[in-house]
């Protein structure tokens, strides 16, 4: 072989290898009935309602034997055709489509060649003119059992695919951190916990960050679940002695219960913790406190204490509320039962009041206080003006649907659902009309439509914000290292 | 100029050759390190960064983990036979014996760090390596909640937070419990991983050959039918739950009895022991201590617990030497060092544990 031939041959070989390596596509099998990809599309955006400012809905066809996929999107006079198994939008194309479809439907025609011949069907996407708060924070965590590694809290821009870490393990010595929550969807009022040495509750008020030790000798534990008052001065929290345990059968996996739990209020201006005899009773477990939209009430879950774990399946929480004095920070009485566990024969978790004061969204499970592993756990929407329960059949699934939060205008909510694989929570969004009707939820779109196929972490406590939080992981790292935690008395 | 280029070329070639040779020598010396790295989804370089340079002990421990993940129990036995007096060695020694129905018979032939040689602790003080191995025994026993938990945690603490050894286990746990939606998530990832495609394909629902169907059916037969909520480290309860569903799960019964014996809880042992379901000279030896202490050395009891005349004679000899030497074990070690009697009277738990 001559030298030139050798060079040519080598070049050809390299090019072939390059082509082979580039050409390998993600194999979508297994798919179909009984798998976590039962729909012909993933994510299944069929007949969903989306906000007009959402990032492109990229998806793929799940039929492993299909070929020659064509998808035609039409809205008004605009028509866009995309070819291939993976439907991935160019930003400009998507923006044009959204502009043409806002307030109406996008009609979609999907066609491909299946194993048994041509397949074609039409579906639609409704584009709501109600914009969604553009920022979503969540903790990325592997399904764990008391332990963690490499935790991150991210903030995702819902109008694009931009993601940034607002706290992560790299900057905080791989300590545990709990989920970030906005107050009423506000980017300038939020908090989360850094646990362990150097940690504390990180409070973000108007862009100023503070590290707080929200614990007092009278409390049974540091604060755990809670929320910031709409005016920003107070926070209401539960203190919980949390016990993890395992189910033996029926794929129920991990169970978590409280051996004890009480409520307390933190005054962020006076660095003061307040506990109350009515919510510190040993015979009653109180948890998941939140404020009403006007800040005049605290909603929380309460259950009669029982021998645990022996009677875990009889531990049911009612939804109750107490008046809150926003001048003094005192949790007053008497408690008013809003949703009775004994009457409903179920247990309530995670109440969240909509910022417009109209709705209360919570989750209902058969029992207990750890719904993420309860397949039967569903979202429930209460009209606070009538006490009536709205129909959420369109929203709920056969897997755990929980950890929800409201957009600042109460037109959208996000929740973590384990639909599909049943193991990994993902953020789903649903629209709420003024009359309380809800829409079929859609999954957070990703740039790579196969993103969720290989994702081995859950999106924990997705929380909507109307503006970016004014800090990042590096700043949190500096606070963790350099700023001493303020004590509370 | 040309000569200089040639020399540079030769130097480069020699350097490359040396690097290649060094890599070859490394791979020949530490084949399990490479395979364990591959099972954890990391390159050799990443593995060295995460776990440091291997030595003989870590290579041996990784060998146990690699072969156990592939269920090559003869190979595990062979590796475990090189006693290193480590918890991981004992754990796999016991597991490989249990797979052959010899857990009890061979228990006292080896270093036994009390119950930690049966179940590796999973907690704040456990190493990631231990956690990654802890689920092997639960999967073998048929207790999927803990097998799945330990695979999840093994993956959580692995350098790349993934790896075929964990994904395969997670897929199989869910295939056994019938959660095909969860299993399909892992099978799809494996199907797209080099070296795992065929393994995954053979396990897609609807693609199982008769041998695999039998394997899943056997595992499903062991699944608990009664749901109880128990603590994360309550191995005895988990074993009793298994036995509550299927009292013929001999492996679970042997693990429970050996747990009782290694923790020297003879009352629990007697409560759990049913001589019609399992037998071993170990159990005979333990029963003799109990019967002697409770004044129950009757003909009926000896017959009921299938205690042989030979074992009884050996026990009497052990007791006479023990009494003669005022409780000293110096004249017992050679003859009785591998008996349960010796373990019961002389094994001391390491305070560090």
Image (spheres, rainbow, N blue to C red):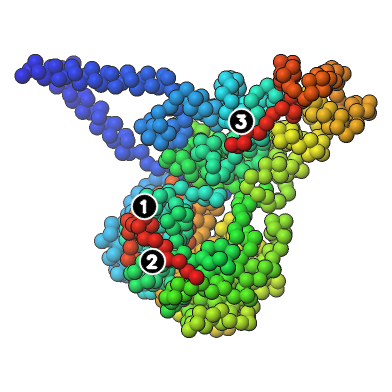
Q: Are marks 2 and 3 on the same chain?
A: no
Using the image, determine if residue B287 lies above or below residue A276. above
Q: Are marks 3 and 1 on the same chain?
A: no
Q: CA distance from mark 2 to mark 3?
A: 48 Å
Parent chain of label 2: A
Q: Position of residue B319 (x, y in %)?
A: 82, 22
Q: CA distance from mark 2 to mark 1?
A: 17 Å
Quarter holding residue B45:
top left
Residue at left 17%, top 24%? A7
User: Answer yes or no: do the residues labelled 2 and 3 have beta carbons within 8 Å?
Assistant: no
Q: Disc 2 on helix, strand or loop?
A: strand
Determine which residue is flagged by label 3: B91
Q: CA distance from mark 3 to mark 1?
A: 37 Å
Quadrant (top left/top right/bottom left/bottom right) for the N terminus of chain A: top left
Q: Nearer the viewer, residue B234 or A124?
A: B234
Residue at left 62%, top 71%? A280
Disc sitting over residue A171 in the figure: 1
Q: Nearer the viewer, residue A361 or A141?
A: A141
Q: Position of residue B278 (x, y in %)?
A: 79, 29
Residue furthest front as drawn: B326
User: Answer yes or no: do the residues labelled 2 and 1 have beta carbons within 8 Å?
Assistant: no
Parent chain of label 3: B
Q: Position of residue A439 (x, y in %)?
A: 48, 69
Mark in the foreground, 2 or 1: 2
Residue A272 in view here: yes
Disc sitting over residue B195 in the figure: none
Residue neighbourhood size for the residue with mark 1, other residues' Cα within 10 Å, grouped as few (<14), some (14–19), many (≥20): some
Q: Nearer the viewer, residue A196 or A57?
A: A196
Residue neighbourhood size for the residue with mark 3, other residues' Cα within 10 Å, grouped as few (<14), some (14–19), many (≥20): many
């Amino acid at each position: 072989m001559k030298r030139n031939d050798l060079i040519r041959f080598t070049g050809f070989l390299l090019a072939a290898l390059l082509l082979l390596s580039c050409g390998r596509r993600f194999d979508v099998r297994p798919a179909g009935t009984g798998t976590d990809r039962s729909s012909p599309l993933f994510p299944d955006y069929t007949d969903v309602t989306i906000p007009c400012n959402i990032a492109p809905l990229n998806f793929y066809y799940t039929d492993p034997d299909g070929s020659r996929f064509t998808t035609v999107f039409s809205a008004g006079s605009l028509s866009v055709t995309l070819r291939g198994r993976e439907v991935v939008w160019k930003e400009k194309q998507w923006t044009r489509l959204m502009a043409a479809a806002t307030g109406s439907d996008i009609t979609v025609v999907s066609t491909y060649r299946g194993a048994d011949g041509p397949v074609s069907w039409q579906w639609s996407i409704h584009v709501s003119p109600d914009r969604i708060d553009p920022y979503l924070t969540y903790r990325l965590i592997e399904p764990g059992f008391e332990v963690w590694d490499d935790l991150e809290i991210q903030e995702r821009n819902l109008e694009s695919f931009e993601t940034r870490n607002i706290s992560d393990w790299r900057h905080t010595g791989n300590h545990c951190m709990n989920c970030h929550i906005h107050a009423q969807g506000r980017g300038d009022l939020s908090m989360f916990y850094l646990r362990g040495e150097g940690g504390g509750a990180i409070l973000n008020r108007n862009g100023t960050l503070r590290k707080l030790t929200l614990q007092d000798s009278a409390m049974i534990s540091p604060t755990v679940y809670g929320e910031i008052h709409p005016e920003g001065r107070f926070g209401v929290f539960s203190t919980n002695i949390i016990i993890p345990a395992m189910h033996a059968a029926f794929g129920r996996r991990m169970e978590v219960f409280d051996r004890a739990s009480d409520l307390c209020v933190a005054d962020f201006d006076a660095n003061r913790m307040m506990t109350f005899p009515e919510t510190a009773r040993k015979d009653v477990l109180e948890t998941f406190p939140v404020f009403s939209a006007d800040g005049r009430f605290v909603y929380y879950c309460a259950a009669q204490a029982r021998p645990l774990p022996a009677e875990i399946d009889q531990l049911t929480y009612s939804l109750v509320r107490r008046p809150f004095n926003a001048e003094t920070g005192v949790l007053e009485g008497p408690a008013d039962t809003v949703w009775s566990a004994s009457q409903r024969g179920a247990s309530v978790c995670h109440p969240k009041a909509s910022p417009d004061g109209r709705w209360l969204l919570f989750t209902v499970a058969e029992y207990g206080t750890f719904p993420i592993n309860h397949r039967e756990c569903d979202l429930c929407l209460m009209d606070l003006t009538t006490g009536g329960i709205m129909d959420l059949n369109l929203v709920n699934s056969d897997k755990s649907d929980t950890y929800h939060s409201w957009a600042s205008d109460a037109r959208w909510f996000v929740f973590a659902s384990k639909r599909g694989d049943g193991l990994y929570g993902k953020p789903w969004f649903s629209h709420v009309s003024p009359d309380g009707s809800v829409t079929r939820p859609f999954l957070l779109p990703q740039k790579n439509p196969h993103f969720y196929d290989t994702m081995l972490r859950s999106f924990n406590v997705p929380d909507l914000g109307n503006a970016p939080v004014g800090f990042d992981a590096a700043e949190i790292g500096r606070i963790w290292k350099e700023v001493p935690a303020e004590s509370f008395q | 100029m040309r000569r200089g280029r040639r020399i540079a070329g030769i130097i480069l070639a020699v350097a490359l050759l040396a690097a290649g040779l060094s890599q070859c020598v490394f791979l020949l010396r530490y084949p399990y390190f490479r395979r364990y790295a591959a099972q954890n989804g990391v390159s050799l370089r990443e593995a060295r960064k995460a776990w440091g340079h291997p030595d003989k002990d870590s290579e041996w421990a990784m060998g146990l983990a690699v072969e156990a993940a592939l269920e090559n129990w003869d190979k595990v036995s062979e590796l475990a036979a090189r006693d290193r007096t480590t918890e991981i060695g004992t754990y796999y020694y016991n597991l490989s014996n249990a797979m052959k129905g010899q857990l009890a018979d061979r228990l006292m032939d080896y270093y036994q760090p009390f119950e930690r040689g049966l179940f590796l602790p999973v907690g704040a003080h456990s190493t990631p390596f231990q956690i990654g191995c802890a689920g092997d025994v639960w999967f073998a026993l048929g207790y999927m909640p803990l097998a799945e938990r330990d695979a999840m945690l093994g993956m959580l603490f692995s350098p790349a937070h993934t790896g075929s050894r964990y994904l395969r286990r997670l897929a199989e746990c869910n295939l056994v419990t019938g959660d095909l939606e969860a299993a399909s998530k892992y099978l799809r990832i494996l199907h797209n991983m080099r070296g795992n495609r065929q393994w995954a394909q053979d396990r897609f629902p609807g693609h199982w050959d008769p041998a695999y169907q039998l394997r899943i059916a056997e595992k499903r037969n062991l699944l608990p039918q009664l749901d109880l909520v128990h603590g994360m480290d309550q191995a005895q309860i988990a074993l009793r739950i298994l036995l509550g569903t299927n009292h013929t799960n001999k492996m679970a019964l042997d693990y429970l009895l050996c747990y009782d014996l290694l923790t020297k809880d003879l009352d629990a042992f007697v409560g759990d022991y049913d001589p019609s379901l399992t037998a071993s000279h170990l159990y005979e030896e333990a029963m003799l201590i109990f019967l002697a202490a409770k004044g129950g050395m009757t003909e009926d009891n000896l017959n009921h617990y299938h205690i042989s005349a030979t074992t009884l004679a050996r026990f009497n000899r052990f007791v006479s030497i023990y009494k003669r030497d005022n409780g000293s074990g110096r004249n017992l070690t050679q003859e009785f060092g591998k008996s349960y009697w010796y373990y019961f009277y002389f094994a001391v738990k390491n305070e560090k544990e």
